[in-house]
Image (tube, helix red, strand yellow):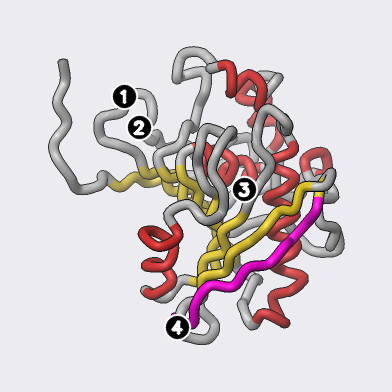
Amino acid sequence: MTGEESYAYATVGGTTLGMDLHRAPQAGAPLVLYVHGGGWRSGNRADAGATRLAPLAARGVTVASVDYRLVPDATFPDQLHDLKGAVRWLRAHGPRLGVPTDRLGVWGASAGAYLGSLLALTGGDGEFEGAVGGNLEQASGVQAVVHWFGQSDLLVSGSRSDIEARLLPFAFELVCSVWTPWPTPPIVLVSSACSPTSRPRRHPSSSRTATATTSSHRPRGRPCTTR
């Protein structure tokens, strides 16, 4: 592994949004955008860098971990605009950085998983593109998603928390199918085996379907216990 590099991919309202690049040891390694968790109100691109991101890079996947704006100062779709700006920045600077960006995945944890899925499901939709960081000649779509222990349906979960209501002031779940008149990338949902509301379901591949066909992986660990 060649180490970690830090870049600023955008400045919005005086806030600098950074990106850490954890390079794989081999040239031409696949690239994934990592979106941290934290309930949309905390966390940054350095989260789990040594324990999660660097080990993946050492195994052959270059990881670009990014900052995005947090609540309460930011509301939806600010965070989505930030992620799209990060993808465009990577594509604009990929040749200089020596990383391939024609096929780019997104990997999000918890709240970051939610945002990563939205990034994938709104590719090509100008309403959600934004202009963060410029590079508007570049595509912001991604080709694969790993949705890691995040929410996938706030309605099924019951009700929104105060933070969720601030982040998503409208019921986007109800119109999600209208957003995606184009093919969506494959999405892999990874969640706790103990969670009754986050078990992935298979959806038919359709231009009117909010999520792509999903598969699941049950993490190893202690078996669930119920009370």
Mark 1 crowdedness (10 Å alpha carbons): few <14, some 14-19, many ≥20: few
Dot 2 corresponds to which residue?
199
Q: Are marks 2 and 4 in contact (CB under 8 Å)?
A: no
Name which residue lies at 68% across and 50% down.
83
Asked if the residue at tag 3 contacts the one at tag 4, i.e. Cβ–Cβ closer than 8 Å, the answer is no
Query: Which region shows up in magenta?
Result: 1-11
Q: Position of residue 35 (x, y in %)?
A: 55, 50
Q: Is residue 33 left or right of residue 47?
A: right
Q: Amino acid at mark 3?
A: Ala
Query: In terms of sequence position, does the residue under pointer 2 or pointer 4 come before the other?
Result: 4
Amino acid at pointer 2: Arg
Q: Which mark is residue 196?
A: 1
| Separation (CA) of disc 2 from disc 3 | 20 Å
First in sequence, mark 4 or 3: give its number: 4
Instruction: Identify residue for label 4.
Output: 25
Q: Which mark is residue 120?
A: 3
